[in-house]
Structure formats: structure tokens, C-alpha cells
Amino acid sequence: MALYREGHIAPIDDDGPVALPLAEWLQAPTQAVALANTDQFNALRTHLGRLKLIALNFPKYTDGRAYSQARLLRGRLGYRGELRATGQVLLDQLPFMLRCGFDSFESEQAGFGAALARARTLFSVVYQGAEDDRLPASLLRLKRRNASEKLAAE
Amino acid sequence: MPDTYFYRYDDFDRTLLSERVDQFRDQVRRRLSGELTEEQFKPLRLTNGLYLQLHAYMLRIAIPYGTLSTKQLRKLAEIARKYDRGYGHFTTRQNLQLNWIKLEDAPDAVAALAEVDMHAIQTSGNVIRNTTADHFAGAAADEIEDPRIWCEMIRQWSTLHPEFSFLPRKFKIAITGSPNDRAAVRVHDVGLRLWRNPEGQVGFEVIVGGGLGRTPIIGKTLREFLPKEDLLAYLEAVLRVYNRYGRRDNIYKARIKILVHELGVDKMREEVEAEFASTRDSALKLDPQTIEAITSQFAPPPLPHRPAMVGAVEALKIEDRDFALWLKSNTAPHRMAGYRIVTASLKPAGAPPGDASAAQMDGVADIADAYSWGEVRVSHEQNLVLPHVAIEDLPAVYAVLSKLGFAEANVGKITDIIACPGLDYCALANARSIPVAQSLSNHFSNLARQHDIGDLKVKISGCINACGHHHVGHIGILGVDKNGVELYQISLGGDVDFGKTSLGEIIGPAVGADEIVEAVDALVATYLERRREGERFVETYRRIGAEPFKERVYGAV
Ligand code: SF4
């Protein structure tokens, strides 16, 4: 399985820690854990500072549960380490995955690295906040309106 | 003066739309070159409204909250001419379907839509679909607040939502702003009903887990009263619970109604509220300025005073019986005296329900420009609506609609039939639905008779997926297949109007295609004999039960 990370068109070497399935990991917590998309992960809460890699799985690319897991890990639990998408990962999912906080990807699809390089620029406007710190159109409109009102007042 | 009285796209909306067109064009190119397999391409084309049907691709175009400007309607006509066979089909979800699209043309068709701020985004696939609303929104006399404001907020929030683009199954939301629910909110994945609480605040009743299909269920109240500013935060909580826990092992059990059913509504509420506790005070909370900015775009047109009593209209009523009937069934009270809401019936005798030719679309656009502030609505009954017509102008509007073939005085009557595409187009169908609708429509074409029969909703589906909403028809007709023969099952007593949602009950064995008209005739005859003064068909049925109807049908067939 080829591993991709933003900033690299070609696959990178996987020289990080090996992610253990949650049940195994709970016995002896290491720096990397692999979650099934049905796993509850409150148990990770106290270990977040130590974790360097969390791998989330897409058994089929149409199974979107890991998107919610990613957002909860990033947004709710404040996890800042590597968040990897594994399983059936296709390039057309990238804009969504990046917005949910994934930053590394296992994929066999041809052209994946090139797609990754473009994925953040496919859409210059977003309608909702997510885990990528982009401002939704509604907030940008508000800012623009307030700025023009301020200008008018001056 | 603004050119429309509903949401106007700005540079943000247009940029996103054109980038989506580019992305889709690239996806189609990769499919045509073989880079993408059909299996990989399918979810991608579906989330841009492209279905593979029996004979060709079908493109389903979103008409957010069923509201169209005349410029948009003319563009739809142009697209139907250029990329289809010159007509389109308005659906029960206020969308427009073109049935003869070529895959290689699809990117150009959606690019043409984008020219008038339209799209086909999320009109199919396992995503949050186009939010529907009362087709009389902003005009109805009984309205508390215009639901389209909130549909627009949901449109933006749900479009290309990164977390909810691969849900267990499709997700449909409907909103009503009137106590007389015209949006069928109890049979949607989420239904929202605006109401004023005893403290005088307007908010939403949130209903969850309703739906038709193979397992028809009436939605349950998840929250009595949700403050308006919390709408998106609450919906995000509902969707997150559904995305994580909705079933994915069986396509027929994947809708949120099954999750609600299996968890129980109390447990569902607990889960949603727990999630909502975290999303409530996030950036999803709607800023008063944002609400105000969108609300102001739905400000109604500045309707001038027009007379409520018009001599010429009264005279024509006496002179022309069909006009009098049309006034009664095809126009509804407007919130302004001197105006009516006009429904253009897309169900002339013997025609396929909901179809309009490009010329007819252009014709309706001309009428709306002249008489209805350039605005047209699509109703979930598959008709078109002119929301703001002065009573003085009604004779003129009637005359031009008659020329187009859209002035049949049958709105809400037995020939105002809802029918799914059925076996003529749909790969899943057991039986044809459109020809059944056509024979019923021909048989009951006499207008005076239809008005005597009164309000009667006939809904026809070609299979148990229930796209024709047969469960909620006063008379529901369902196509079934028995050893290769097309048969029709009849149910009675379904309803979605006036907050009285109920599901129909099957009255007996299915009947053949050649017997269905006779059977419906028998049902109608039973009603006419047994009805009390002022009682509608469905009310008589509720009072006397199914027995007398059954006897008549199975005696007659
Ligand atoms: S009800 Fe069945 S036949 Fe009719 S459109 Fe839906 S899937 Fe097709």
C-alpha cells in the first residue's frame, strides 16, 4: 500500500510506528493506533498527547463513518498528531478528507499524489466550517459587510 | 428593484458552483477514458444528479425550495431542447428530471445550469438532498414565517459537506411555515415545522424518521421547540448520530427511520442532545446578522393594492362554468387581499403527470413575467404555481394557461394524480404507473363530476420504493409483479394534509391493469352514496371504514 502525505507527489516511506488495532493497543498503549470505524474512542482521551498516529479505516469508500471519527478526534478531542486514511481511499474523496482533518493517505490509485497536490485548491469557497480552519462563505460575507459598513462610516 | 424576491447568488455561490462544474467535468472525462470504473464513478455521478435508467441517463436538477425565476425556467426549457427531447418532468421533490441525457453532454448541461445559478448537486446519492418547502411559501394566507429562508441556510450548510457526503442512505429534509402543512414534513428523514410557542417566539418542531418507501413510517417529534439560531447545530448533531450509527449492512434498513425505530425515539433524542450539547455553541450557531441578510432576500415583492372584488371576474364566473371551477380548485388565498395564488395544473386530461414541454415552460415563464412578479414554484404535487396573481388579472391568466393546456380545473381533485415514472423509465419498476394515471385521468375527465367528487388524492407508485407516495394517497395504487404480470394493489385512507398524516391500508388482492379504472370507479361510487354533507372522500372512509368499499370493488371486479 502506498502512503501519501501533502507536499509529496510520490509515495513516502512508512517509517513511523506501527498502528495497532484498538483492542491490542489498549493492552499496551504505544504511539500509534488503528481504529475500526465502529470503535468508540473515549479511551484514547488520556493518551492523546502521546499518540503520534491514528489510522482510520474506510472498508468501502462509500462507508463514511470515519469522516465523523476524524472530526471528533480533531475538533472535539483536540488530537494534533498524524491522522491517516486507510482502506479504500480514492482521490475523489480527498477534498472531503482534508477538510475533516486527515493528513496522510494509503492508496493504490494511479494519480493519487498529483490529485492530493491539487485537492485543497479544487474549491476556493466552502459553505461550512470543518477541521481545516477555512472560513465558510457565511462568515466571509459577514466580514466583508462589516468592513464595507466601517468604510462607509469613516 | 431586485430581479428576484428570493435568495440571490453572490460571488461566493457562483465560484463554488463553477468549481463544482469543473470537478464534475473532470470526473466524467476520467470515466469516459476508462480511468474510473463504473463502480467508482457511480457515487460521483449520483451526487451530481446523474442516474442510469432503463434507456439512458437521467439528470435530476435541483430546484431549491421549489422556487424558480422566469430566467431560470427559460434556461431549463433551453436545456431540455438542447440536451433532451424537448421536455422535462417535474417531480414530487420539486426537482426537474430530464430523461434522455448523454453522459458526454452532462458536463455541458450542468455548466448551462450554472449560468442561471442552478445545479444538480446532491439530487441523488447517499447525501443530504435538496430541502423542500411549502410551494405557497411567502404568499400563503396562513403562513407564520417563510420556510425558504431556512431551506437556503440548509442548502449552504449541506452542500459538499465534508463529513456527510457518504451517509448510510439518502437524507431528505422538508420545512413548512404554515399550520396547514403542505410540505409533508412527517414523511421525511427530518421534517421541520415552524411554529410560535406560548412565549411568542418562533422556532422549529423537529420531526425525525418519517418516510415512505418499503417501510412507511410517520416521523416522531425529536424536539418540540428548537430556537431558530440553533438549526444548523442541531441538524449537524442529528446527521452525526446518523452517520455514525445508521445501519450500512442492508440498503433497505439504512434510512434514519430504521435507526430511530431500533434505538427508540427517546434514546435517539438522548444521543442527539448529547451531541448537540457540543455543537450548540460552536460556529454553527447562526449569527443574527446572517439570519437577517438571508431573510431580507426573501422580502416579498412590493405588491400594490389591487381590488378584492372585481366585476369582470364575477361576471365571467357566471358566464363560464369552467372558469368558475378553475377559480375554486386552482387558486388559493393569498396573504394580501386582492391577490390569489394560482396553480397551473400539469395534469391535463390523459397527459403524463408532471410533464412539461420546453414551449410550455417558456409559456409559463411569460405568464409569470406578466402577472406574477417573475416567480414560479414547483409543488410536490407536480404542478407549477404562480404565487402572486392579482384577482383582476385572473381572467387573462386563465386564458393564457388554457392555451398552454395548463388550466385544467382539477387541482386537488381525482385527476390531479401523482405518479412515479414507473416501468416506462425506471429500472426498478414492477409495473407501469404513467399509463394507469392516464387512463384514470381520461375516465374522470369531466370537470363538473370531478368537482362533485371533491378533494381526492390518487397516488401511484410502480414498485415498493414508493416514489409516487401511494402510502399517503387517499387512494393509493402500487404496482406489483406476479409471475411477470403487472398488477395493482389498492390502499385507502392515506393522508399528509392539514397535519393529519396517516398511512393507507391495503383493501384486498391486487387487480389487473384493465380492472383498475373500474375499481377506482367503484370506490368513488361508494363514497358518493355514503358521504355526508361536506365530507371529503377520506373523511367518509375514516367514518365508515374499508368494508363498504371492499364489497363494492371486489363485487365489481
Ligand atoms: S416507485 Fe419504484 S418504479 Fe416508481 S420511480 Fe420509484 S423506484 Fe421506480
Image (cartoon, rainbow, N blue to C red):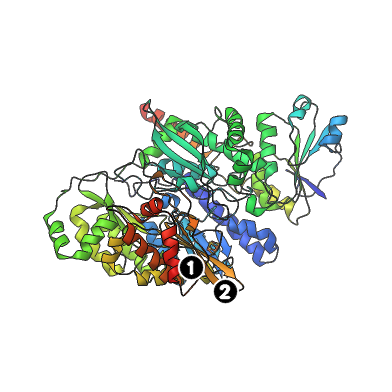
Q: Is residue B233 above or below residue B430?
A: above
Residue type at mark 2?
Val
User: Is residue B377 in sight in this rendering?
Assistant: yes
Q: CA distance from mark 2 to mark 1?
A: 14 Å
Q: Is residue A26 above or below residue A103?
A: above
Q: Secondary structure at mark 1?
A: loop
- Residue underneath mark 2: B485
What percent of the width, then of the height, locates residue B238? 57, 38
Image quadrant of ligand 1? bottom right
Q: Is residue B556 above or below residue B3?
A: below
Q: Going by the image, does B224 lie left or right of A44? A: left
**Residue placed at 49% from the left, 66% from the top?**
B421
**Residue placed at 77% from the left, 26% from the top?**
A49
What percent of the width, then of the height, locates residue B105? 54, 67
Query: The C terminus of chain A lies in which quarter of the figure?
Result: top left
The quadrant in which residue B548 appears is bottom left
Q: Going by the image, does B54 lie left or right of A67? A: left
**Residue placed at 75% from the left, 57% from the top?**
A110
Task: Categorize mark 1 by other alpha carbons within 10 Å: few (<14), some (14-19), many (20+).
Answer: many
Q: Chain of mark 1?
A: B
- Residue underneath mark 1: B433
Residue type at mark 1?
Ser
Task: Categorize mark 2 by other alpha carbons within 10 Å: few (<14), some (14-19), many (20+).
Answer: few
- Given residues B331 and B537, the one toward you in this image is B537
